Image (cartoon, rainbow, N blue to C red):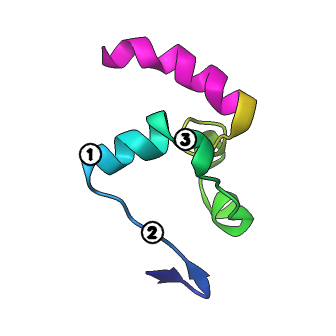
Amino acid sequence: MFLGHLPMLIVCDPEAMRDIFGKKANCYHKHNEVLKDLMDPMLRQGLLQSEDEFWKQQRALTSPAFH
């Protein structure tokens, strides 16, 4: 799928999402600044848009809610 000229991937498989957002999160990067600018400012600082150390902190805070 493309957003203009930018390739995008939509993931619906729960196991793939578990890998992308959990087990193998360090293998995936969110480099699309154009998409980040289009999204609501509250989402940019959330778990789906954050990266690296900030993402780890956000993940640690929210993880207990899902167990």
Q: Which residues are magenta?
A: 54-67
Mark 2: which amino acid?
A: Leu
Label 3 secondary element: helix
Q: Is residue 14 magenta?
A: no
Image quarter where the C terminus lies is top left
Q: Which mark is residue 25?
A: 3
Judging by the rendered image, the residue that carries numbered circle 2 is: 9
Q: Mark 3 touching mark 2, by CB under 8 A?
A: no
Residue at 58 percent across and 86 percent down: it is: 4
Number of other residues with Cα within 10 Å of mark 1, as a class: few under 14, some 14 to 19, many 20 or more = few
Residue at 73 percent across and 63 percent down: it is: 33
Mark 1: which amino acid?
A: Pro
Number of other residues with Cα within 10 Å of mark 3, as a class: few under 14, some 14 to 19, many 20 or more = some
Q: Does residue 58 sit above or below 18 in this rendering?
A: above
Image quarter where the N terminus lies is bottom left
Counting residues from the start of the chain, the first of labels 3 and 1 encountered is 1
Relative placement, left or right, of 33 versus 42 is right
Label 2 secondary element: loop
